[in-house]
Amino acid sequence: MQPIPYFGEKLEGDWVYEEKIDGWRLQIIKVEEEIKFFGRRLTKNPDWTEKLKVPRENLKRILPKKTILDSELYSDKGRRFIPSLFAKKKKAEPLIYIFDVIFFEGEFLGNLPLKKRRKILESLNFKPPFFLLPQYKLVSIEKILENFRETSSEGVVFKELNSDYRLGKECPLVTEFWRKLKFRR
């Protein structure tokens, strides 16, 4: 994801924005009837399926086989409580924010524009602790800065609605179509 290099930059095209969740990247995978959870990048043991104790029944019902979702793992008490979600006695409740679909029914969807991938996600009925991360039409970066200034948000992510999802060896490739703006905390 590319940062916005300066505030005077003009984003050409049809853009949306969403809150940047300061969590841990999580891939949700449905293989046959089983739901698996994998951390991404730089994780020594990325298979979190057995350690992450979250209800999976809803996902088993709504996701077709051979589906991969991109999401962010967070907790109701903030980032520093995420490790407790893997403990026998967790100290927080998980919040999982889903923001993209990479494979659906075994078909790679990365070549589809974001707006079509988003429609697929919107057709699913996620139940807590799984949430579809809200997206909003980008009208003015300045207004977003005004609105988010007083929040505890880590920042915002801007995405071009016609952008694809490009895979690299370990993660999505950085493109000019997804931008982030982080706030100092």
Image (cartoon, grey):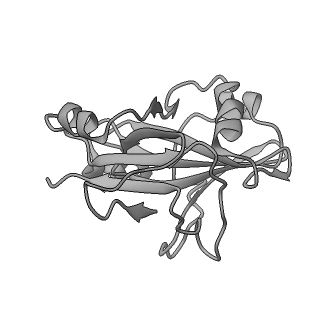
- Choose top left, top right, bottom left or bottom right for residue 179: bottom left
- Choose top left, top right, bottom left or bottom right for residue 161: top right
Picture residue at 64% right of the left edge, 44% below the top:
114
- Choose top left, top right, bottom left or bottom right for residue 99: top right
Answer with left or right where residue 129 lies relative to residue 4.
Answer: right
- Image coordinates of residue 109 in percent, x first then y, are 76, 50
Answer with left or right where residue 162 lies relative to residue 96.
Answer: right
Residue 70 position (above or below residue 137): below
Picture residue at 35% right of the left edge, 41% below the top:
75
Relative to the observer, which residue lies in front, 157 or 51? Answer: 157
Relative to the observer, which residue lies in front, 28 or 49? Answer: 28
- Image coordinates of residue 154 in percent, x first then y, are 26, 48
Picture residue at 60% right of the left edge, 74% below the top:
170
Residue 63 position (above or below residue 158): above
Answer with left or right where residue 157 lies relative to residue 118.
Answer: left
Picture residue at 34% right of the left edge, 59% below the top:
4
- Image coordinates of residue 56 in percent, x first then y, are 63, 35
Relative to the observer, which residue lies in front, 132 or 33? Answer: 132
How many numbered marks appear? 0
- Image coordinates of residue 71 in percent, x first then y, are 53, 47
